[in-house]
Every structure is written in structure tokens, then in C-alpha cells.
Image (cartoon, helix red, strand yellow):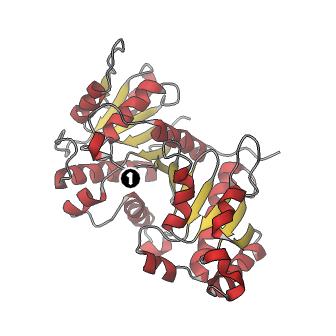
Amino acid sequence: MKLPIAITQGDPAGIGPEIVAKAFRDAPQLLGGCFAVGDVATLRRAAACIEGPGQPPLPVVRLEALEEIAGLPPRCLPVWQLDELAGPPPLGRVSAQAGRDAASCVVWAADAALRGEVAALVTAPLNKEALAKAGVPYPGHTEMLQARAAAHVGVPLAQMPVRMMLANDELRTVLVSIHVALREAIDAVTQERVLQTLRITHAVLARSLGRTPRIAVAGLNPHAGEGGLFGREEIDVIAPAIARARAEGLDASGPYAPDTVFMRARSTPERAGEFDVVVAMYHDQGLIPVKYLGVERGVNVTLGLPLARTSPDHGTAFDIAGRGSADAGSLIAAVRMARTLAAPASPAQ
């Protein structure tokens, strides 16, 4: 890949810088052509905390130009320093400054991706409370990236619809609604939102898989409503959306009982899944099955943006920040996924 991949440092008081350092140390071949966006001193502190007996230090290099990345040796951590960052904050504490610095890294990297200067964006975890303390008007990465993309393209926010996909080697799930209260999430199950989710899911996976994805749609109610006994959303909203999607040529089916559809979609070495992805009606319905399979392997992907963005499937873990014990597996998986999404797919045979 000719363009580099940007990896934001995340909240500097959490494990983000630590897992970034571990990823560059432990997966040097995969991380070739990647760089961190953040603060050199913060990332040097992180590199120091992961040093172990018999291990050489991880060099942290400040970049003056992105072109320098290609000439760097493996197993070093290149950093694009943002001058407005305050430097290393106390570990394990929520603060406005840490939230502000984390957001600044995301904004810079998103804008670089939108300008075509980087191939993809991988975001280390940030803390929603810290963002709020900093006055950032977005609850998380997804909403922040949606706003930057809409502004870049010059369209209203409503014309830049995005969806969250959580994926690992065994299961993918896409959400109709994201970070809203459960009562609001039920109201968000409209025919237009379900259809829009199916269209976005189809478009992204068709590119990455190189073929038409098989999309299963979960019901909202127990047993997918049991023919209207437990609610009519499946009959009045979800099934008509699926019918419209199928009329457009999408391979969508359902609505299926939520308590079994994820098992049917799961792929294992012993059994291929029946579906490539499950569209779930709300946050916990879709994320619990994927996270139960192991957060260290899960990847968060934002669908619908004019850029490729992935993230680890875990938070800032303030309770263990600075100990050197954080697992970088999910971040490494996120980089691998970002490479897949940024590269053009080969047509399926």
C-alpha cells in the first residue's frame, strides 16, 4: 500500500498509547507503513512501560514529513506530533485536557484521510467522559468522524449516514442505531433506517469481499415477534425494508429470531456461517455476541464514511493504564482490517 495508515494515540491517560507501542513492537511487518498521530513524549512513556527483561527499547521517532515513513526500519514507532497537545497527563484519570488531546488527534487524522494523504484511519480508544469535559460536542469517534466527513463533502449531517460494524474472524454485525438510550433505539427502528443500514452494509462488504454479501436481519422482539404476538415491528417495519432491499438486488433475508441468528451466522473452522453479516436493531443486541467471542479479537468499523476507519473493540481501561499489561491484539486486528478495507477487493471466484 503506497499511502500510510494513521493510528491515533487515543486518550493519553488510558491504554491507547500503550497498545499502539505494543503493536509496533510485536507486529512490525503488519505495522510497516503505519504511523501514530499524537504526542512524542506520551508515546515514549508508553514505550518505556512495555519494556521487559531482555527486550531492546522501542525507538520512538518524530516525523518531519510522512514520506520519511517508507525509509524507517521495522520495529520502531514513527509519530506525527501535533503541536497543540499538552503532553503526558496523569495516567488513569479522566481530564478535559486528555479528552481535548484525544479529539485533536482524531480530527487531524480524519482530515488527512479525507484529503487522501493516508490510506486509512485506526483509532485507539478515547474516553467519552473526558470528551464531554473538554466540551467536544460528540459522544464518540463515530459521530465525530461523521461530522468531519459531512463538512469535507459539503453536505448536511443527515446526508452522511454512518453505521457501526463490529467484526472478528467468526462474526460480523452492523447496527441500525448506535449510542442512544434503549427507548430511543426502539423508536429508531423505522423502515427507512433499516433499509439505509442494509444499503450501507451491502456497499461496504461488497467492496471488501469482492462479491454480494449475504445479509441476515435480526428481529427486534423475542422470536422475531412470533407472527405479531410479541410486537408488530417485524411485520410492519423490518420485513417491508428487507423486501425493498431485495427488490434492489441485495441478498438480505429475515427477520430472524435474535437469539439464534448470530449462531447461524458465526463461522468456525468446523462450520461456515450461513451469512456474511447480521444487521442488528440496536447496540447491545448486536455487540454482545461479537464481544462474547473475545474483545481481544474484535474490530469496530465505521461504515458509510468516505474513508476507511477501524478501532479496537475495547475502551481506555484506566484501571490498568501504565502497567504494560494491556493486550494489543484488538488494535493489531484493527490495523489488519483497515488494510483490507483500504485495498480494492479481488473479484470472488
Rendered location of residue 324, percent (x, y): 32, 30
Taking the spot 36% from the left edge, 29% from the top edge, the residue there is 78
Taking the spot 44% from the left edge, 80% from the top edge, the residue there is 183
Query: Which residue is the site of mark 1?
Result: 111
Taking the spot 67% from the left edge, 77% from the top edge, the residue there is 224
Q: Is residue 130 above or below residue 187?
A: above
Residue type, numbered disc 1: Asp
**145 lies left or right of 284:** left
Rendered location of residue 195, percent (x, y): 63, 75
The local secondary structure at tag 1 comes to: helix
| Tally of numbered discs | 1
Q: Is residue 29 above or below residue 290?
A: above
Circle 1 residues within 10 Å: few <14, some 14–19, many ≥20: some
Taking the spot 36% from the left edge, 60% from the top edge, the residue there is 140
What quarter of the picture does the C terminus occupy? top right
What quarter of the picture does the N terminus occupy? top right
Work out whether residue 303 can be spotted: no
Q: Image quadrant of residue 227?
A: bottom right
Rendered location of residue 334, percent (x, y): 50, 43
Q: Is residue 17 above or below residue 93?
A: above
For the residue pair 118 and 323, the one nearer the viewer reads as: 323
Work out whether residue 125 can be spotted: yes
For the residue pair 185 and 137, the one nearer the viewer reads as: 185
Rendered location of residue 179, percent (x, y): 42, 68
**326 lies left or right of 223:** left
